[in-house]
């Protein structure tokens, strides 16, 4: 239920122990334990159903950053702080924002807050951002 007393529908997939995406199969062991635990023990994704956003995406919809053209890269003044080949977006806000993990450089669930139209924020706590954005989704709907 939203703050405006609207009924909101979220979907949480059945936990998965089978990672079928070849890119993720190779890298799943590098996913932080807390995130793997979410997918394997709680939900294979959890998001606002109408937009399929504002939540953790199902494993088969995790964004591999290397697979996309990111126009923002040309506009950045500082060197890129993540490796696109090993970075995956686990959370999407539906408006060009991602909470992403560089699997080669993810200490203590630190993530990158990535935007398609603004400079990224590095070394943010994955779960803090996920929690904040889910609350924002519940407030704005």
Image (cartoon, rainbow, N blue to C red):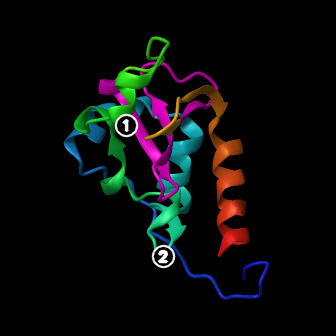
Going by the image, does 33 lie left or right of 52? right
Q: Residue furthest top?
A: 79
Residue 11: where, in percent of width, then height?
Answer: 50, 74
The part of the chain drawn in magenta is 84-113
Q: Determine the secondary structure under disc 2.
A: loop
Identified at 54% across, 44% down, the residue is: 35
- Counting from the top left corner in percent of width and height, residue 45 is at 47, 61
Disc 2 to disc 1, C-alpha distance: 25 Å
In the displayed structure, 49 sits above or below 87; it is below
Q: Is residue 83 above or below residue 41?
A: above
Relative to 101, is 111 on the left or the right?
A: right
Of residue 125 and residue 37, the one placed in the foreground of this image is: 125
Residue beneath the point at 37% across and 20% down: 83
Q: Is residue 104 magenta?
A: yes
Which residue lies under the disc numbered 1? 28
Percent coordinates x, y for residue 10 in the rendering: 55, 75
Residue under the image location 37 percent in, 53 percent down:
59
Q: Which mark is residue 52?
A: none
Residue that appears at 29% across and 25% down: 85
Residue pointed to by mark 2: 49
The percent position of residue 120, horizontal first and vertical second, equals 53, 30
């Amino acid at each position: 239920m939203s703050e405006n007393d609207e009924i909101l529908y979220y979907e949480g997939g059945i936990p998965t122990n089978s990672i079928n995406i070849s890119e993720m199969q190779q890298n799943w062991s590098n996913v932080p334990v807390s995130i793997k635990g979410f997918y394997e023990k709680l939900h294979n994704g959890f998001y606002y159903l109408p937009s399929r956003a504002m939540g953790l995406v199902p494993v088969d919809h995790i964004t591999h950053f290397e697979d996309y053209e990111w126009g923002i890269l040309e506009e950045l003044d500082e060197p890129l702080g993540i490796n696109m080949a090993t970075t995956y977006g686990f959370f999407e806000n539906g408006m060009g924002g991602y909470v992403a993990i560089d699997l080669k450089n993810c200490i203590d669930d630190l993530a990158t807050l990535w935007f398609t139209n603004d400079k990224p924020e590095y070394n943010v706590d994955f779960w803090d951002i996920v929690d904040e954005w889910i609350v924002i989704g519940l407030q704005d709907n």
